[in-house]
Each structure stands twice: as C-alpha cells, then as structure tokens.
Image (tube, rainbow, N blue to C red):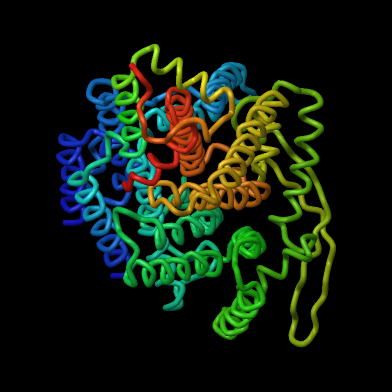
Amino acid sequence: MIDYFALALGHGLIAIALLRLVLRDGLDIDPLVSSINAETAALRQGTTTAGRNAARRARSAGDNDSINPGSAPDA
Amino acid sequence: MLDLTLLAFFGYLLVLGLRRPFVWVLLYVYVDILAPQRIGYSLIVSLPVSMIAFAAAFGGWLALDRKEGARFTVRQGLMVALLLYCWWTTGNADFPEDAATKWDWVWKSLLFGIFLPFTLTTRARIEALALMLVLAVATIVIGTGLKTVLGGGGYDNLKFFVKDNSGIYESSTLATMAIALVPMIWWFTRFGTIFRPHWAVTAFAAALTFACFLVPVGTEARTGLLCIAVLALMALRYVKQRVLFLMAGAALGLTALPFLPQTFYDRMATIGEPSGDESASTRVAVWRWTIDYAERHPFGGGFDAFRGNSFTYTLPIKEIDGNTTTTEYREVTDKSRAYHSAIFELLGEQGYPGLAIWLMLQALGLWQMGRIRSRWQNRTQDEAEAWIGPFAISLQMGAVIYIVGALFQGIAYQPVMLMLVGLQIGLHSYCKRIDSARSLLERISPHGPAADNQVGGAVTA
C-alpha cells in the first residue's frame, strides 16, 4: 500500500512537471542568452564600422563622461 | 495493473517528447534511476525500456535539437578518458567475466554522463533535470520514510520497490544520494519555475527532507548518518541565524531519539567501535590489501579485482548466557570482500591513472561550483540570474556529501552522481555562455559595461 502511494505521488508529480515543461517557453531557447544576443545583433545592425570604431576609441580613453549614454554614434 | 500503469507512464513521456525531444533525456533519467522495468512483474519486464529511452534521448538530440550552446568541456574529456581506460582494464582484467558484467552498466553510466551536458543549454533544461532527479529519488525516499515511520525499517529488512540491492536501491547508496539532494530540494522552494515558490512547495520540501533524513534511520546505514552531519556542517555556512539553526537541529535530534529502534543504536555504536563489527573490520583490511595490490598492479586489475583478496583477522565474538556475557577473540578468514570505498575501488580496479582521473573530475567540479558561487551569488536583483549562485551552492554541497559517502562505499560510478556531474558541467557551460555573450555585447556597445546591466535587468525568464 505504501509502495503504491509513493509510486502514485512520485509519478503524478513527474507527469505534472513534464506537462508544464512542454507547454512553457524557454525550454529550447534560453531567454536570457537570446536577449543578450538580440541586443548585440541590434547594436551591430544599428551602427556602421565607423560608428563602432568611434565608440571603441571613446571607451578606450576611459572617459565615461565624454560619451552621452543613449546617443548613437555618428554614421 | 502496475505494469500497465508504468507502461502508460512510459508511453506518456514518449508522446510528450514528440513535442519537445528534451523530455526523452528526462525519460532516460527516470528509467535509469527508478528502473520501472524491475518494479513491474510481467509486460514491462520483457521490454527493453532502458534501450528505447536512450535511443530516443540520443536520437532526439542528434536529429531534432538546436544544439545551440552545446560544447565539449574538460570534465567531459576526463570522463571520456576514464571510459576508455576502464575499457582497457576490462580487457586485461583479473576476473574477465565479473569485469565484463560491471563494465556492462558502467560504460552506459559514463556515456550518459558525457552526453548529458550537451543537452543542458537553457535554464529550463537545467532546472528540469534537477527536478527529475529530485522527484525520481523522492519516489523511493517517500516510500522508505513512510515505512520507517510506521515501523518497517531495519538494516537489510526495509524493502524497496526493487529488491536486488542494485543501483540506488542499495540502502547506503540511497541514504547518501537522498541527503546529497537535500540542498537542491530547498533550492526549488525559492527559485523553481516549473513549480513556482508556494507554501505547498515548501511543505512538500520539508516533508521530503524529513523523509530523506529517515532513510539512514530506516535502513540503518551508518554512512547516511555521517552525510547528515556533513550537511549540517556545510549548512552552517549559509544559514543566517546559526544559533537558532543549531538549537533547532539539536531539538529535532533529541525529539527523534525515543522513536529510534534499539537496532539503530546498536549499529550506529559500531561507528566509534569498528573492531566489534565484521563489516567495519573488513573495510580496513580490504583497504590495506588494495594499497598492496596497487603497488604490484599500478595500472589496476580491472573491475571486481577485489575478488582475489583473502585475509585473516581477529574479531571479538560476544556470547550472552543468562546474566553473563563472554567475549571470545576468534580468527576469521574472509575472501572476496568488496572495497567499501570509491577511492579504493578505483585504486584497485583502475590503478593510479583511473583514481587520478576520477579525483580530478570531482575536484574540478567542486572548484567550478565554488567559482560560480562566488561570482554569481551577489547578482540577486534580476530573477533571470539570481538562481545561479544558490544552484551552484546546492550542487557543491551535494558533491561534498557524495564524496564523503563515497569514502565508505564503492559508488565511484554511481549513475545518479554522474548525472549530478553532468548537471554541474551544464551549469558551468551555461554561465560561460552568458559571460561570453555579455563580453561580446560589451565590446561593441557604445556605453560599455552600463549597457550590460540594462540587458540583464530587462530580462526575466
């Protein structure tokens, strides 16, 4: 009797858990990694080589105050 | 009826896998731990469920999975090296037939341990595997706990679903793995996304933890008691109110004392007096024999090389006659005694190279989990990352408990532990993936690290 109870409880929980897993998003594509990658792709598309170089030069100078956050580099 | 139910459940998981092939990986984990083909009596026994599950898991991954972020790691390399080395020693074993029997399940465990990290590419998958491990072991533990509470325990008396003392159904192994999973059980009460934090989840975790603690009591496995002590010591590092924790632990222990059977006290008393117990006495003798054997065979004697051992030692035999107890010291000769320790199991079977690979595999895991813990434990603002540090802690604690338990049991190739190793590798690779994606973003971002935080903060899984 105890064995049947334990088997029923364990299998019941596994069945519910896997059903929830199958129905949810994020099982095959990780939301965190893909959002970082999407951000990277958007930045790559939105800036030209010249713009990226300008931004890199500004950053390497270590001057956070010289760049206005949010403004896109000149194309 | 039981067979049909188990078969229906197996079929249910196969069908779910059609939509998400990763479910087939979990199906293999379920089959490997619970062994439904050995719980049933007729129909399911005749089916090769383990082979079907592995074929589905591997085939599904190969043909249908995106494989995005899958990478081969150093620790997988170590497992490949151990697998190849075991194959070589099996071919040159002292006892070829026995070695072949053990090789038959060891290679599958190692291969699945190597394969598993390739599939753990997302947070949901890492959590799903952890949940499957917990629930599969919980199914056995719940039954064990209930039987212990209702008075059906005792060393070699407590009956599991499977009664052949194999795999996780060996009492000391079950006790060790159940205690090793306790930190992970509590991780689910705070960070679970399949079963979200809820009072019902916490209540289940508390009941399951109690059942896990009852496994060493019910099976009278001394190693389990040691594992509980190790768990308590490690938990002290992370609990906020240590005095309260210690007092609660002491109160729980004192409350439990009157309910423990006399046989439990008798068996636990042999921890401090190993000379009075044959099992404990032979351990020391086997360990000495193994060290001598390894000097003569530094590259190992293949699986089950212990079958060649034989030694004589003196054991006190107590005889009670009315009110008089007489102790007589008799010489006892033992043959083919098992290693009773993963360290000596590896030393005897795989020699120094095999032992070195296994130690590196475990040590690297402890180090990696420690590193993830220190790097990620302060990232608590974002729900998408807050789970990582505590998860690494639970895996690290589980690994330490397993290693302590393995010092006194021959469980070097325990499939559940190899799955936990797979989980550690999966988590490590996942963290590296986030780091590398972040550093790429940082390199091309015009705002530098500031953009980094914005991205992390914008995402909730």
Vertical placement of B26 versus B325: above or below? above
Q: Nearer the viewer, residue A8 or B115?
A: B115
Quarter of the figure that contains the N terminus of chain B: bottom left
Q: On the rendered structure, is B407 left or right of B134?
A: right
What residue is rendered at 15% in x and 48% in y? B8
The answer to whether residue B108 is visible is no
Picture quadrant of residue B430:
top left
Q: On the rendered structure, is B457 left or right of B77?
A: left
Q: Position of residue B83 (x, y in %)?
A: 53, 23
Vertical placement of A7 versus B118: above or below? below
Q: Position of residue B450 (x, y in %)?
A: 47, 38
What residue is rendered at 55% in x and 69% in y? B217
What residue is rendered at 77% in x and 71% in y? B318
Q: Nearer the viewer, residue A41 or B406?
A: A41
Vertical placement of B258 versus B450: above or below? below
Picture quadrant of residue B345:
top right
Q: On the rendered structure, is B427 left or right of B344?
A: left
Vertical placement of B435 versus B457: above or below? above
What residue is rendered at 26% in x and 36% in y? B24
Q: Position of residue B51 (x, y in %)?
A: 30, 31
Q: How many discs appear?
A: 0
Q: Nearer the viewer, residue B270 or B311?
A: B270
The answer to whether residue B156 is visible is yes
Q: Position of residue B105 (x, y in %)?
A: 45, 32
Q: Nearer the viewer, residue B295 or B238?
A: B238
